[in-house]
Amino acid sequence: MKKNIYLSLAGLGTLLGLIAVALYIFLPGLMINDTALQGYETIFGYTASESWGPFSVSAEVLTFSTPLFLVLMMTVVAIVLVLLSTLLPSRLVNFLVSIMFIVSAVFVFITPSMVVITDEAMNFISRDDLSLPAEATISGVLFIIAALTSGAGLTSKK
């Protein structure tokens, strides 16, 4: 019976991790001055554009960020590990999933230092202009709770 509780906690942790990554992707993940960028824009890149009548200007501000892409990939791997937990030892699965969620939380919290600003945008934007919105902070906290919940199975005597 205890094993079922630990597996359900690992499943709950994975569900929280899935919610956290969904929040991170679809809600604001980075603020540049007063402009909120969605999480997917911070990961895959962002191009700003302005138009004045018949004239328009666009410039690439952010490019693809590999460390932030790892947040997505670690969540996918954690979900697959939990789904395969019947084949692997559950303590190993809980440990790996917890580590992945902790690393994801750290990456979310240090997003402003990990985005890749293009050279042409560096003339207008400095690292001091970047900040983490409340939505991304909530996502990071959910990753930490997911790591703690997934790691609950590590305390079993088996």
Image: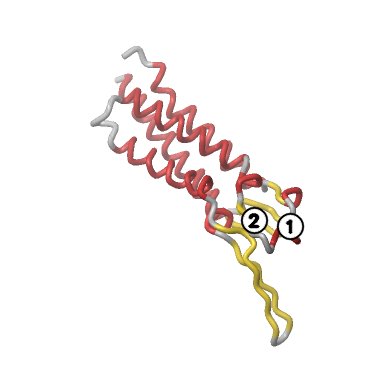
* Residue 43, horizontal then vertical, whole percent: 54, 53
**Residue appearing at x 52%, y 57% in the figure:** 44
> What residue sits right under mark 2 in the picture?
117
Q: Quadrant of the C terminus?
A: top left
**Residue appearing at x 64%, y 56% in the figure:** 117
Does the CB distance between marks 1 and 2 fall below 8 Å? yes
Type of amino acid under label 1: Ile
Q: Nearer the viewer, residue 154 or 3?
A: 154
Type of amino acid under label 2: Ile
* Residue 5, horizontal then vertical, whole percent: 35, 24
**Residue appearing at x 36%, y 30% in the figure:** 8
Looking at the rendered structure, the secondary structure element under dot 2 is strand
Which disc is residue 136 wearing?
Answer: none
Looking at the rendered structure, the secondary structure element under dot 1 is loop
* Residue 50, horizontal then vertical, whole percent: 70, 74
Q: Is residue 146 above or below residue 132?
A: above
Which disc is residue 125 wearing?
Answer: 1
Name the residue at the top extreme.
157
- Dot 2 crowding, Cα within 10 Å, few <14, some 14–19, many 20+: many
Q: Nearer the viewer, residue 89 or 124?
A: 124
Using the numbered discs, state the Cα–Cα distance from disc 1 to disc 2 in whole angstroms. Answer: 8 Å
Q: Is residue 3 above or below residue 13?
A: above
> As drawn, is 11 to the left or to the right of 124?
left
Q: Is residue 119 above or below residue 50?
A: above
The answer to which of marks 1 and 2 sits earlier in the sequence is 2
Name the residue at the bottom extreme.
54
